[in-house]
Amino acid sequence: MTIEYRQTRDFTEEDIRRLFLSVGWESGRYLKRLVTAMRNSTHVISAWDGDRLIGLVRALDDGATIAFLHYVLVDPSTRADTSATNS
């Protein structure tokens, strides 16, 4: 898998739906609101495997002193297996 990081706010409703529902977030059912929220966010960095959205970080700030991460999502099917124990 080759991951490409992009600073874009241009997501399709299907991109958003699939990613948000993959992590079990019900907000993935409010597609028009989420797409609008992404387009109006201060910063959005996304992770793509080809044309598939697999991760997203959304930050909001006041431009002077305060910033916070509002969303951090990673499609579970793309995460490394961390359940293995070391012997």
Image (cartoon, rainbow, N blue to C red):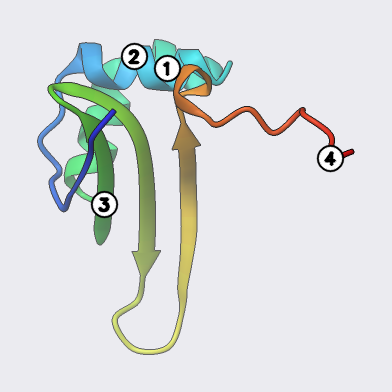
Instruction: Confirm or deny contact between disc 4 and disc 3 (CB under 8 A).
Output: no
Which amino acid lies under the numbered mark 3 shown in the image of this protein? Val
- The picture quadrant where one finds residue 2 is top left
- The residue labelled by disc 1 is 28
Distance (Cα) linking label 3 and label 1: 17 Å
Instruction: Confirm or deny contact between disc 1 and disc 2 (CB under 8 A).
Output: yes
Which amino acid lies under the numbered mark 2 shown in the image of this protein? Arg
Vertical position of residue 42 compared to residue 71: above or below: below
Q: Earlier in the sequence, mark 3 or mark 2?
A: 2
Instruction: Confirm or deny contact between disc 3 and disc 2 (CB under 8 A).
Output: no
Residue density around tag 4, few if under 14, some if 14–19, many if 20 or more, within 10 Å:
few
Q: Earlier in the sequence, mark 1 or mark 4?
A: 1
Q: Nearer the viewer, mark 4 or mark 2?
A: 4
- Report the number of numbered marks: 4
Label disc, if present, on residue 86 of the rendered structure: 4
Q: Which percent across, then down, holds residue 64?
A: 34, 89
Q: Earlier in the sequence, mark 1 or mark 2?
A: 2
Say whether residue 51 is left or right of residue 46: left
The residue sitting at 10% across, 35% down in the picture is 10
- The residue labelled by disc 2 is 17
